[in-house]
Amino acid sequence: MIKKISITIIVTLLLAIATVTFLSIVGIETTKFNNFIKNELKSYNNKTDINLKKVKLKLDLNNFYIKISTLDPTLYYNSIEFPLEKLSFSIAIKSYLNEEFGIKKASIETKYNKITNFLNTYQSETGSVQFFILSKTLKKGDVKFVVDFEFDEKGKINNNYIINGEIKDTKIEIFKDYDFNHLNFDFKIKKNNYEISDASFNFNNINFNSKKISIIKNNEDHQVIGEIDNKDGFLNDKILHIFSKNYENYLDIDNSKITSNSSFSFDITKDFKIKKLKTHSKVKIDKLRYLSKNKKIKKYLPDYQDQIYLVDSLVEISYFKNNYKFEGSTNYLLKDLYDKLNFKISKLGNQYNFNFDINFEKNQILIEELNYLKKINSKSNLKLVGKYIKNKQLTFQNIKFVEEKNNLQIVNLFLNKNFKIIKFDKVVNNYLTKDQIKNDYSIVFKNPNYKISGITYDGIKLLDNMFESSDDNVFNIFENLNSKITIDLKQVYIDKVNYLDEFKASAEFKNNKIKNLVLDSVFPNKKELKLTINTAENGEKVTTVFTNFPKPIVSRYKFIKGFEKGTLDFQSIKKNDVSRSVLKIFNFKVKEVPALAKLLSLASLQGIADTLTGEGIRFTDFEMIFSNEAKLMTIDEIYAIGPAISILSEGYIEKDSLISLRGTLVPARTINRTISSIPLLGDILVGKKVGEGVFGVSFKVKGPPKNLKTTVNPIKTLTPRFITRTLEKIKKN
């Protein structure tokens, strides 16, 4: 009997062990737990339902759980269908027997579902405005995920849940300028921690990839950290219109490839606002074409043809709290060959810092203000270091240009918002000008004054500007110059041949205008040049010039050639922008004056004309009385007398537009005869032996400077004014 009972117990135990083993390893399929699972889900949320097929049961003896799993179930929430791949639960046997909430663990593996279904479901459950907006921006896309989570005894999900999933072919529409397509990525979600990996998407027709993006919840905000890159995408309208709506006016991006790698971090608030944005990007663009009909560029870069080609541009961009830094390099082309440009630009608040390092070898540089030209195939380098305060001031801390033995440097140049010079600390010039004259001098600022000193200075360009402009315009590059300038130079060239020795000057400026000036220098032939400017308290400015070597000065006027000898005396009085001036030149000779030659020819004075083009015509006196106001010069009188001819004229000149002169030209024999006919006075001044006949011409010269028309009419009677002026000169001599 005992034996039978023992055998029964053993068999029962073996069957139990076999059953438990079978249930633990293989399990069984049944539908008996379907209602239990449905009821458990409804107890958690009555809007939830599930359609189950057969479920499989397995025992977990370690935790005393029943594991229930089913394939291809369908979950319903508010009648929205969510097809699942697999659903599994771990039920505590004790809780099940006590009719308590028994699900301890659950795992849900979905099939691909429309992502909008999940978003709409969450939004309807929570009432989240943010998820409502998000659901409207997501136009398409599918999601698949696996959720592993645990419940407490009350049926609440614990915080140790894990969600692994995949999103594919998603389209996001935020604004019309932001086009997200084909968004694909894997994700992993834990409490307060989200990870996105192996992401790819198309943004405005450029494909991007991201290996990892982390999202960490911090109080009410979420911190996003990640990286993103693209390879060989093509720049397009959609991308560039984000930054500029009219980029086509200055950029050509035909087949321009862009490659980039970026890291970023930012916080996103619960209402989807971005803050603390920080980015760092490396960008490569294979080619660009900058378009601009900028006359200022053409002025300094003669090879510029309204466009600059940029090739293999590399840029590093950093951004944080509305501040940024650009650093990179590019090859640029103006005409035929490429040069190199390196740059650093940063913004901090309203201050912009910059550092440019530009190589010029294949391109020309022309700086007319300095009379400098760098030719092609001459290695040179320009460094620009400075800062710009928006709407206030531009400062060049260092401008340095080096070309072989030539170098120019400006230290601490301050410009106002209109790019007028406020001041500078130092200028060092050591270079060969276009005229092959060595500039070797420096300008040093000692508040509030400047000192110019050195060996040689090419003053040709400065003199050209002074002859072409009023003194008010020559110094308009300054904001408001109120300084004393002293000059001490060994040599100052006034043209390619002539120069002044021991050039010393002192000038006082007020509001960009010369108030007082004293200049004293000599030519190599020991001839003098003296210039003074004095301004009275009533604003009247008196300018005087004296030289017994006027040739270099007169020769600057291109219509006069072959000027020799003479003495020049000039005086001008200016008040209220109107000047009255007298120019006198004594005992000189000229060889080429085209206007005079034409006049002599028309007057049939070929003999005198031949003299003009041969040995030249001598004059004993030349006097010009004139006034200037704005661009109008009014000539009250030009009187010239000499052994061959005398001229008396008047008129006006409108700068760069019109010349109008009229007057009288008389050969010397006529003058002699006329004066000799004056009783007693003629005998004393001329004598009885004079040439026969009375002859002269009246003339008019009028027209644009480059197309003057000259007319003459014979006269036999001289005007009283002509005779009077002649007598005055004769008496004086």
Image (cartoon, rainbow, N blue to C red):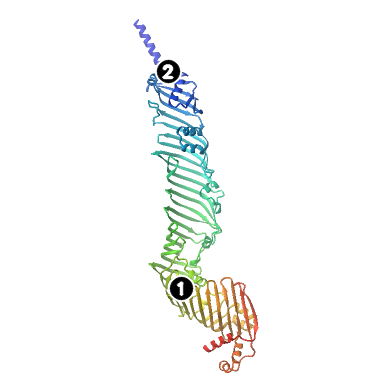
Does residue 733 appear in this view? no
Instruction: Bin the neighbour count of mark 2 within 10 Å (Cα to Cα): few under 14, some 14-19, many 20 and up.
Output: some
Element class at badge 1: strand
Dividing the picture into quarters, in which one does residue 694 lie?
bottom right
Image x and y of residue 4, in percent: 37, 6
| Residue 712: % across, % down | 64, 80
Q: CA distance from mark 1 to mark 2?
A: 112 Å
Residue 302, given in percent of the width and then of the height, sits at 54, 62
Depth check: 95 or 335 in front? 95
Kindly give the residue lying farthest to the top in the view shown: 1
Looking at the rendered structure, which numbered label has been put on residue 492?
1
**Crowding near the residue tagged with mark 1, few <14, some 14–19, many ≥20 C-alpha atoms within 10 Å:** many
Marks counted in the figure total: 2
Above or below 41: residue 271: below
- Circle 1: residue type: Val
Residue 85: x percent and y percent?
Answer: 49, 27
Residue 427 in sight: yes
The picture quadrant where one finds residue 1 is top left
Q: Residue furthest left?
A: 2
Is 270 or 590 nearer to us in this picture? 270
Give SS at disc 2. helix
Q: Which residue is mark 2?
A: 22
- Residue 320 vertical placement versus 45 (above, below): below
Amino acid type indicated by mark 2: Phe
User: Tag 2 or tag 1, which sits nearer the N-term?
Assistant: 2
The residue lying toward the viewer, choosing from 298 and 392, is 392
Report if the CB atoms under discs 1 and 2 are less than 8 Å apart.
no
Q: Is residue 225 above or below residue 425?
A: above
232 and 638: which is toward the camera:
638
